Every structure is written in structure tokens, then in C-alpha cells.
Amino acid sequence: RNFAQQTERPNRGNDRGPGGRCGMCRSKEAWEHFIFVPLPQSRVKTTSIVPRVQHRRVDESQGTALQDAVMALGLAGASAVGTMLAPSAAFMKLAMMVPPPPSLPPPAPPLSAATAATATAMAPQQFSLLDTLLPNFNTDTFIWRVSMLQISEYVGSLLLGSAYGSPKLCSLYLLGASWGPAIAQGAVWRLMLPMMLHANALHIFFNLFFQMRIGFGMEKQFGRRKFCLLYMFCGFLGNLISVAVDPMKLAVGASTSGFGLLGVWAAEVLLTWDLLGESRSRIFLWFAFMCTSCIMMSTISPNVDFVGHFAGMLAGFLLAIILADMQEEHQPPWYNKAKLTAKNVTALIVILSLVRAITLGPDGPIPYCGTIFHPRRLPF
């Protein structure tokens, strides 16, 4: 999730036309020639009016802890090369690609099933590239259908208006990109629709690859309804917190939901920590590599929307604890207290973020892009 460098609003003295009235209605600063809807003088706030375009992307691979470290460094380099080659690299940079979480050890099978499992393991297994890239691949799943919908949305954004092979900014805005002033005026659907939009081909490719690589197995584990709730809530709360923290940016991307799946996995590790045994060291090492990679990419590319990523992960972590249904004999001593705390924290975050983004959000400016059926023909 990336954005263009933000430019400060010119001094008030330079923003007045004839007669001493605000000349904001003729402003063409944002997005070079982007014209905003005129606003009454009483609603104009002293805030930056240049939006920042952000998009999110994450990636995943499998291997041992040492391989994860090497893969993280390799992906960071590939991300930098992709940024230079992308047509929109002047104002967009590829986001972070993190290594995958190490798989949790399965529970010990009963003695009667151990013999059958051993015989199955000794049988020759056929190599499948699809199963290697996308474990538990299944077209009759929510994650597959939402991924196909995101591809359709991307094609639609290109047909609505594209430049250098990427959707134009007005195309993304008309299709529901996150924009703080519009949300403050009641366009709350912009808290959900950004997870269906992407800024360029590399952006959507890595986001979809990541979410399908871990999503198929997670949906099989939790069930379709619970997984759908986790995915959509992570995207919603990630966008909401991101807008509440910094409303003056145009944001798209599904990585709030993607990082939310990582938060779900982190909650599962926390709740089953006493049952992991020897896997604890490898899991801790993976978390260390993931945090290091995120910090490194945030330093190399300061335009990465760290708030959106972190908010999505936090949403997945909290909701996974709320929805947890562990057997009583496996529950940690603090299990019930953790569920109650997660409910209270989630409710508090949602209420405060809604108040900040809608009630206290900026009134403008509002981009003037026309309508979906009659979009403005702008060069960007």
C-alpha cells in the first residue's frame, strides 16, 4: 500500500483570488491537474489537499527458518527491482512481501491410525505444482471467489480508464477507493471496497497469490462462514484505522485482509503456545524474521502504509481470539479473560475510529471525477 509524496498546502495568503475570497475552487495542485469540487469557505480546513495514492501488497513462500530469512531478503530485492520497472513507479512502490508462517505440528494420531498413516507416508507421492504453490486448492471456496471478484474489479478499473497499463486515479476513486473526506461525508462503503481494488498488475498478483496460498488451508480449518467473517472484518477495520490516522490519501489493496490472516495465525499460536512443544523456537524465529523484513522495507520504501498493514493484522488477531472455540482441556488459564479483553478492545477501537474518521474527519476536498458511466477523461 503505497502513496505519492505529500505536498504541503500553500500559504493562505497565496490562496486568495480577487476580492479576498478563497480561490480553492480553481486549485490544480493535487495530481497535477486534478480539479476539486468547490467548497464553502466555512468548511475549508487548513490541511494538506494533495492526496497520496497507496496500495498494498504481500507475498508468501514456504521453507525452514533459515530459508525464510534468505527468501525475505530475496523478495525485498525483487520488490525494489519491480518498483523500478513498474510504469507507475514515479508515485507507487511495491509493498512488503513476507515469508510464510511455519506450520503448526498436527496433534498426535491415535494408535490405531498411526499404522495407516505410516503406510500412507511410505507410498510414493506425486508431485503437483498447483498443490505446491497453492496448498489445499479448491475452487468451491470463498477465498477463490473473492480473488476472482478482485480480478474482475481490476479489469473493470482498466476499462474505466488506464494509463501505462495501470488504472487511473479517477478510476480507482469512482470504484470506491478509500478517501478520508468522502468517508467523512457519509461514503462509508469506501471502508470495504478498497480491498477489491488494486493499483497495478504486480500489486494484484502478489496480493492474490499471498491470500490464496494461506487462505485455502485456513478456510478449510475454520469453515467458510467464519473465514469470510475474518477476511471481511480485517479489511474493514484495517481501512478504518488507516483513514482515522491519516485521511488524506487515496488507498486501495487487499493486504489489510492479507495481513489480517497473519494476525489470525498469530492468535492461534498464542492460544496453543503450551501445546507447541519443540516448534516454539522455529515459530519465534519466523516472527523475528518477519518483523525485521517489515522494518527493513519500511525504511527502504517510506511510502508503505504500515498503519493499514498493522491494523489489519490487529483486527485478525482480536477477532480470532473472540471466535476461538478450544476444548476445555486445551484452554490456557487466561482463555476466558483473553476473549473478554479482545471483545472490549475491538469495540473500543471500532467506536473511536468511526468517530475520528466520520464525525471528526475533514470535509474536503472531494475529487471531481464525474461518474462511473460518465467519467472525466484525465491524463492520470
Image (spheres, rainbow, N blue to C red):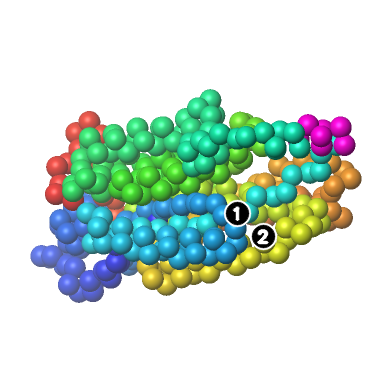
Q: Is residue 207 visible?
A: yes
Determine whether, in the image, residue 258 is placed left or right of residue 101. Answer: left
The numbered mark, 1 or 2, whose residue comes first in the sequence reads: 1
Closer to the camera in the image, 161 or 146: 146
Is disc 1 placed on a helix, strand or loop? loop
Determine whether, in the image, residue 6 is placed left or right of residue 378. Answer: right
Callout 1 amino acid = Pro
In the image, residue 2 sits, relative to residue 166, either above or below, namely below
Q: Main secondary structure of the magenta part?
A: helix
Q: Is residue 179 visible?
A: no
- Residue 43 in percent (x, y) is at 33, 57
- Residue 180 in percent (x, y) is at 39, 53
In the image, residue 133 sits, relative to residue 276, either above or below, namely above
Determine whether, in the image, residue 277 is placed left or right of residue 286. Answer: right
Outermost residue toward the top in this view:
140
- Residue 135 in percent (x, y) is at 55, 39
Callout 2 amino acid = Ile
Circle 2 Cα neighbour tier, 10 Å, few/some/many (<14 / 14–19 / ≥20):
some
- Residue 341 in percent (x, y) is at 74, 55
Q: Which residue is mark 1?
A: 101
Q: Which residues are magenta?
A: 111-117
Asked whether disc 1 touches disc 2, contact meaning CB atoms under 8 Å apart, the reply is yes
Q: Which residue is mark 2?
A: 283
